[in-house]
Amino acid sequence: MTMKAPSDTTKYLVYAEIVAEGIVERPDVVGAIFGQTEGLLGEDLDLRELQKTGRIGRIEVKVESKGGKSYGEIKVPSSLDKIETAILAAALETIERVGPCAAKIKIQKIEDVRASKRRKIVERAKDILRGLFEEPEIESEKISNLVRQAIRIEEITEYGAEKLPAGPAVNESDAIIVVEGRADVLNLLRHGIKNVIAVEGTNIPKTIIELSKKKTVTAFLDGDRGGDLILKELLQVADIDYVARAPEGKGVEDLTQKEIVKSLRNKVPVEQIYVIKAKETKEVKEQKEKEKEKEVKIKIREDKEELEKLDKVGVLKRHKEEVEGKLIARVLDKNFELVKEIPVRDLVKALKTDNTTASSIVFDGVITQRLIDLAAKREVDYLVGVRLGSVVKVPTNVRIITFDEL
C-alpha cells in the first residue's frame, strides 16, 4: 500500500497509544487502522480516500513487544478541520483487534500544528527585531519601542524563596513598589519601572515582609475590592510607607504610562489611609490583641486626665479644630505655641530628618505605630491625631490623644 508524504497543509497531529494482547508489528497496526475503519464513517471520511487526496498524511507507528504484549505509539497528520479530525480520532478508538490479537487504542492528544508554528514565528520575529535591523533607514520609532518593551519584559526575574515575579532593580533600590501579580510587574517593566515586586495573592510572602523592614515601600494596587483586601493584609504584616491606587475599576496591569505616572505621583503616606488593623482569627491572638488595646486605652485616659489637671486640653482642642479635615500637621513647642505647619504626608520625613524641637504634634491623620516610635525618639510629649491605627505598644514618654478624646 502506497502512503503519501505528510501534506504541507497539515493542521493537526493526532497522537494515540496502542496496547495489544500478543506480538504484533507495524504493518499489522496500519492494516487494522485502514481495515477496521473502512466504511465506518462514509466516503467523505474514508481513510484510504483521505490519504489519496493528501488530507491525511503518512500514518506513523512505533511498536515494541514486552512480556508477551505489544505497546506502541500512533501519529496521524490531518489537514481536515477540527470537527472532522476529532471524528477521525474517535474512530481509531473503535479498533478492537490487530492481527489475531485483541487490542485497544487510546487517543492521547491532538496538537494544533499551526499554533506551534505561530509560537516559532513570534520568537523568530523577536530575534529579528533585536538583531537583524542594522540599517538605520529601516528602523522606526515604533520598532524601537517594540524592541525596548520586549527587552524590558524579558528582564522579569524571580525573587526570594517564594520566587516572586520582580524587576531587576529590587535589590539595588532603596525604594520598591509592591504590586499584586506578575501581569502588573510586566506592565511596569514595559514602561521602564524596574524596582517592582509582586505579592502573588492575599497571603503576603515572608520576602515582602522582610523587604519592607529595610526599604521604602509603596503599595501600588488595583482600584477594586481585591486591592482593598491586599492593602489590609499588607498593613497588618508589613511596614508600608506609601499607598498608590489604580483608577477605580482598573487594574495596574491595564494602565498606560500616563496613568501609571499619575497614580504613583498621587501616592499617599500610610498614615492617611483610614484602615484599622483587622482582628486575627485565632482566639489566643484575639485575646492578646484585646489586652493590648485595653492597655493603650488606659494610657490614653490617664494622659487625658493629666492634661485636664494642667489645663492644656483647651489649647490642644483649638489646634485640633484648626487642622481637622485639612490633612495638615502642627508642630508645637513646650508652651503649645506653633513652631511650624506641614502637610501630613511630610510628617514622617520631618520627624526623621528635621532638627526642629517638637514638644507636641497635632495632625489630621491616623496615629500609627511608626509615628509613635518616631515621636518617642524625638522626645515628643503629646501626639494628637484623628484616630488610633495599628498600635500595640505606647512608650511611657509619649502621651497619645485622639480627636474624639478632646
Image (spheres, rainbow, N blue to C red):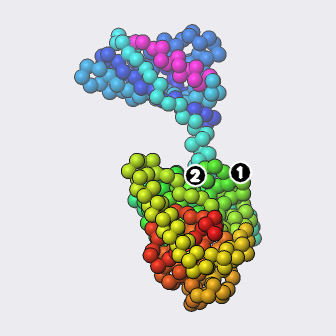
Residue 26, quarter of picture:
top left
* Camera-nearest residue between 251 and 77: 251
Q: How many marks?
A: 2
Q: Earlier in the sequence, mark 2 or mark 1?
A: 2
- Secondary structure, magenta segment, majority class: helix
Most distant residue in the front direction: 309
Kindly indicate whether the residue at mark 1 contacts the one at mark 2 (C-beta within 8 angstroms).
Answer: no
Amino acid found under the numbered disc labelled 1: Gly
- Residue at left offset 36%, top offset 21%: 19
Residue 319 visible somewhere in the drawing: yes
Magenta stretch, residue numbers: 84-97
Instruction: Tell me what residue is drawn at x 58 percent, y 36 percent.
Output: 112
Reply above or below: 217 against 10: below
Residue at the spot of label 1: 249
The foreground one among 48 and 183 is 183
* Amino acid identity at mark 2: Leu
- Closer to viewer: mark 2 or mark 1: 2
Quarter where residue 150 is shown: bottom right
Residue underneath mark 2: 229
**SS for callout 1:** loop
